[in-house]
């Protein structure tokens, strides 16, 4: 292959990567905006938000969910390229459930066993299971549209990461409404809702992202 041809191929590949990165960023911003508007219009903030914001348990929800969203967004973005390196970020995402598990253990140790069931059930389990998937729909749809303009080597994984990122965005928003700050509640109900969205993303990815 001539040097000039190689340079042309590399330049075209670089242009495509920049184009996909720009499209993904635009669609991600659109998805976040849709979720934020839906949250503000239909859900809203909890009535005691200023007081709750002074609690470490309340703030911990954002550490976990925002961390999940950021890492999953990076993985979803990299999954749109057939040669995207996701190994380091895939390992990083394992830190989130480990952090949450540690918080659950601390809560179980610090509370009498008679309180465990109350913290687990909480007040808003049904709303959590309904609203997180609902708020995830916009970001998930937008990221899937962006990924269709990429070239995912593993469509199912790309869709799952889009679902995980979307649910991370949704849970970060919903955490400002949810009255339950217990790590035990978060580990149970938030995780179940996230699993639903991630599974939906995986199934959608296998169907829509094949190339």
Image: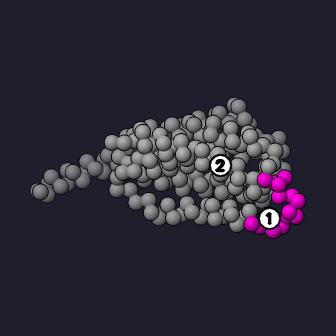
Horizontal arrangement in the rendering, residue 75 relative to residue 131 (left or right): left
- Reading the image, the residue beneath label 2 is 192
| Residue pictured at 55% horizontal, 60% vertical | 93
Dot 2: few (<14), some (14–19), or many (≥20) neighbours within 10 Å?
some
What's the residue at 63%, 36% (across, down)?
Answer: 134
Q: Tell me the SS state at disc 1.
A: helix
Quick check: 166 left or right of 144? right
Q: Which residue is mark 1?
A: 108
On whether residue 107 falls in the magenta region, the answer is yes
* Magenta segment, prevailing SS (helix, strand or loop): helix
Q: What residue sits 50% from the left and 50% below the top?
A: 161
Tag 2 secondary structure:
helix
Q: What's the residue at 65%, 48% (across, down)? A: 192
Label 1 neighbour load within 10 Å: few <14, some 14-19, many 20+: some
- Say whether residue 204 is visible: yes
Picture quarter with the N terminus: bottom left
> Distance from label 1 to label 2 (Cα)?
20 Å
| Residue 195 rendering spot, x and y as whole percentages | 60, 48
Q: Picture coordinates of residue 147 (x, y %)?
A: 42, 43
* Apparent side of residue 130 relative to residue 116 in the rendered image (left or right): left
Find out whether the residues at labels 1 and 2 contact each other: C-beta distance under 8 Å. no
Label whose residue precedes the other's in the sequence (1 or 2): 1
Q: Would you place residue 58 above or below residue 94 in this image?
A: above
Bounds of the magenta span? 105-120
């Amino acid at each position: 292959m001539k040097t000039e041809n190689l340079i042309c191929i590399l330049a075209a590949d670089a242009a495509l990567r920049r184009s996909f990165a720009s499209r993904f960023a635009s669609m991600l911003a659109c998805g976040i905006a849709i979720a934020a508007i839906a949250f503000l219009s239909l859900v809203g903030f909890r009535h005691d938000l200023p007081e709750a914001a002074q609690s470490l348990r309340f703030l911990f929800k954002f550490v976990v969910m925002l961390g999940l969203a950021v890492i999953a967004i990076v993985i979803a973005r990299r999954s749109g390229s057939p040669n995207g390196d996701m190994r380091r970020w895939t390992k990083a995402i394992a830190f989130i459930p480990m952090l949450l598990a540690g918080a659950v253990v601390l809560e179980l140790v610090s509370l009498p066993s008679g309180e465990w069931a109350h913290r687990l059930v909480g007040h808003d389990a049904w709303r959590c299971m309904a609203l997180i998937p609902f708020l995830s729909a916009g970001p998930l749809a937008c990221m899937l549209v962006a990924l269709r303009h990429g070239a995912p080597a593993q469509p199912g994984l790309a869709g799952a990461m889009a679902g995980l990122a979307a649910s991370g965005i949704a849970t970060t928003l919903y955490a400002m409404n949810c009255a339950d700050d217990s790590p035990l509640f978060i580990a149970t109900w938030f995780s179940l809702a996230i699993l639903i969205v991630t599974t939906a993303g995986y199934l959608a990815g296998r169907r829509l992202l094949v190339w």
